[in-house]
Image (tube, rainbow, N blue to C red):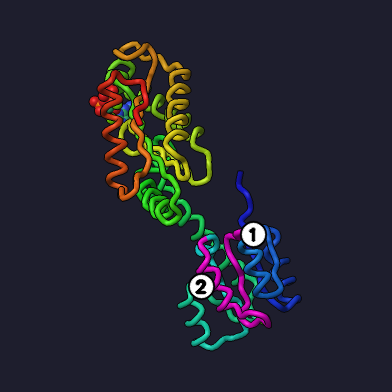
């Protein structure tokens, strides 16, 4: 459960690599690179939590490695500490300005290196936790609305650029107020979590997203999915939720919990607001038509 954090040591000097690796090995998973090119390759492939980066290397200096790490979305967030023989204040300032977390001058003190590595790895963990809290809904563990809005905008731009379809479905639990009234709010929370889990399991293609839009309303984003496929998926999900058979004796729809879904697929000239409004209008029609159905 508590997997070791990964540290990449990039230095053209074999002795330096070995000394740092021996220091770090008892506490971290250590990766090694002997030049800038290898450092970039390892960083992209293994996405370490932290890079200890030498500045002077023959093929590509550490500053350039950091610039390239920052330019690639896969490696942009990796923490970097320079470990360098270039000890002038200007060098240190340049390293920090490029986005390094810290700058350690050679010859280094082993205890100080370990302390700084531990500090920066702790900051990495804290930042990840904050990102998680900012993007994940606490009750359902689905992406929250903030996250959905970000992804929706990005996928919309991509669909426009590549001229690929983009489908969106709004899912709303039927007669959920009565469910809470009859079974109590904690049972309502459990039912909502079960619906969320099932929805999440249905959207599993890369780029797909299930999010909690608000209250008992979820939203499914399906890039590169046309109306026929998205509608089919929504209907299978609706059916799967029926088959969960969560008793709802107070519902006028069925003796089990049901959902209504409104969906829409991006049309030429539509913006995100129009796509969302179309799905919302279809959800309204699904409700009007008797609930427990998909309208696309
Ligand atoms: P409809 O079929 O028209 O959707 O009826 P409804 O009762 O589901 O719709 P309405 O919007 O009137 O009520 C939604 C209910 O969902 C009211 C609210 O108490 C409940 N709800 C929203 N969020 C949560 C939640 O996080 N937990 C629980 N237990 N209930 C929630
Ligand atoms: Mg060097
Ligand atoms: Mg609702
Ligand atoms: Mg509802």
Viewer-nearest residue: 23 or 173: 173
Going 67% across and 80% down the picture, which residue do you hit?
59
> Real-space Cα distance between discs 2 and 1?
20 Å
Q: Is residue 56 above or below residue 32?
A: below
x and y percentages locating residue 36 in the rendered image: 65, 74
Q: Which mark is residue 100?
A: 2
Q: Which contiguous range is marked in magenta? A: 47-73
User: Helix or strand or loop: what does disc 1 sit on?
Assistant: helix
Residue at horizontal 47 percent and vertical 19 percent from the top: 244
- The numbered disc on residue 256 is none
Residue 106 percent across, percent down from the top left? 63, 81
**Could you tell me residue 290's position as x and y percent?**
29, 18
Q: Nearer the viewer, residue 262 or 220?
A: 262
Residue in view at x 35 percent, y 37 percent: 264
Label 2: which secondary element:
loop
Query: Can residue 120 be seen by looking at this rendering?
Result: no
**Reading the chain from its start, which is encountered first: label 2 or label 1?**
1
| Residue 259, horizontal then vertical, whole percent | 36, 24
């Amino acid at each position: 459960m508590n997997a070791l954090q990964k540290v990449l040591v990039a230095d053209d000097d074999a002795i330096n690599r070995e000394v740092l690796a021996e220091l770090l090995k008892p506490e971290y998973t250590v990766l090694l690179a002997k030049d800038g090119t290898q450092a970039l390759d390892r960083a992209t492939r293994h996405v370490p939590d932290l890079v200890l980066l030498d500045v002077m290397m023959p093929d590509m200096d550490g500053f350039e490695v950091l610039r390239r790490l920052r330019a690639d979305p896969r490696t942009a967030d990796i923490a970097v500490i320079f470990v360098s023989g270039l000890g002038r204040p200007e060098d240190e300032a340049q390293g920090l300005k490029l986005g390094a977390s810290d700058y350690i001058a050679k010859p280094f003190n082993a205890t100080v290196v370990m302390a700084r590595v531990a500090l920066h790895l702790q900051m990495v963990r804290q930042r990840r936790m904050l990102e998680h809290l900012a993007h994940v809904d606490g009750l359902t563990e689905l992406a929250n609305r903030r996250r959905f809005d970000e992804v929706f905008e990005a996928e919309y731009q991509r669909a426009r650029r590549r001229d690929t379809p983009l489908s969106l479905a709004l899912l709303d639990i039927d007669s959920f107020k009565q469910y809470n009234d009859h079974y109590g709010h904690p049972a309502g929370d459990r039912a909502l979590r079960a619906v969320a889990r099932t929805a999440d399991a249905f959207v599993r293609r890369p780029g797909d997203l299930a999010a909690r839009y608000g209250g008992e309303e979820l939203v499914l984003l399906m890039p590169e999915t046309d109306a026929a496929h998205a509608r089919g998926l929504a209907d299978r999900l609706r059916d799967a939720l029926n088959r969960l058979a969560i008793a709802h004796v107070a519902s006028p729809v069925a003796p089990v919990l049901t959902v209504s879904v409104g969906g829409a697929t991006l049309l030429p000239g539509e913006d995100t607001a129009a796509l969302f409004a179309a799905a919302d209008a279809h959800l309204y029609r699904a409700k009007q038509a008797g609930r427990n159905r998909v309208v696309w």
